[in-house]
Image: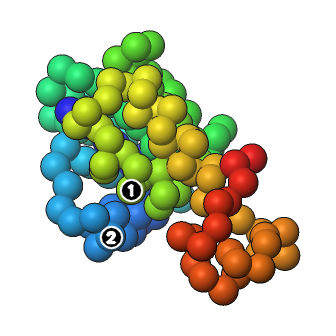
Amino acid sequence: MIGLMLVTHGRLGDVLLETLVHVVGPQTQVGVVGVADDDDPALLRPAAERLLQRLDTGDGVLLLTDIFGSSPSNLALSLREPGHIEVVSGVNVPMLVKLAKTRRDLDLAGCVEKATMAGRKYIAVASQLPDPCLHGGPRACTLPVH
């Protein structure tokens, strides 16, 4: 199973994980590294490496960050190992839900593909949606993928 590590600003990763558990239930092989304003990411690296080792059962780990180019993102990128440890920025709840449902069955590349597609699919601007979407929920329409 693919491990998941949320590397985010402050408590965002904790809140995203709490939301994921609320939506789909308890998760294993998931960890969080929160980077506070006054943290030195270089000093967080050893703890992040230890967490990464715990999350990796051999199938790989996906590191999810909130903002590309930020301190959490740069920390995650420093841990990347092509083909085994991947980094995706812009984490959102739909991505996490998709990963919870697919990470047992797909390889790392497949998880990345499914997660990024789900993350994009559920970004919607109400004024750009057809009426059925506004009144019947997500099952009443097909959201365009951007």
130 w.r.t. 36: above or below: below
Q: Secondary structure at mark 2?
A: helix
Check disc 2 and report the residue beneath it: 23
Count neighbours of disc 1 (C-alpha within 10 A) and say few if under 14, some if 14 to 19, many if 20 or more: some
Res. 9 in view: no
Left or right? Give the position of 49 relative to 6: left
Check disc 1 and report the residue beneath it: 97
In the image as oriented, which residue stretches furthest toward the right? 127
Question: Which amino acid does the dot numbered 2 rest on?
Answer: Val
Q: Nearer the viewer, residue 42 or 25?
A: 25
Instruction: Indicate the quadrant where residue 86 lies.
Output: top left
Count neighbours of disc 2 (C-alpha within 10 A) and say few if under 14, some if 14 to 19, many if 20 or more: few
Left or right? Give the position of 125 relative to 61: right
Residue 73 is situated, as x and y percent measured from the top left of the image, at 54, 39
Q: Nearer the viewer, residue 64 or 140?
A: 140
119 w.r.t. 15: above or below: above
In the image as oriented, which residue stretches furthest toward the bottom? 135
Task: Give me the residue at 43% from left, 23% from top.
Answer: 109
Q: CA distance from mark 2 to mark 1?
A: 8 Å
Quadrant location of the N terminus in the rendered image: top left
Left or right? Give the position of 55 relative to 34: left
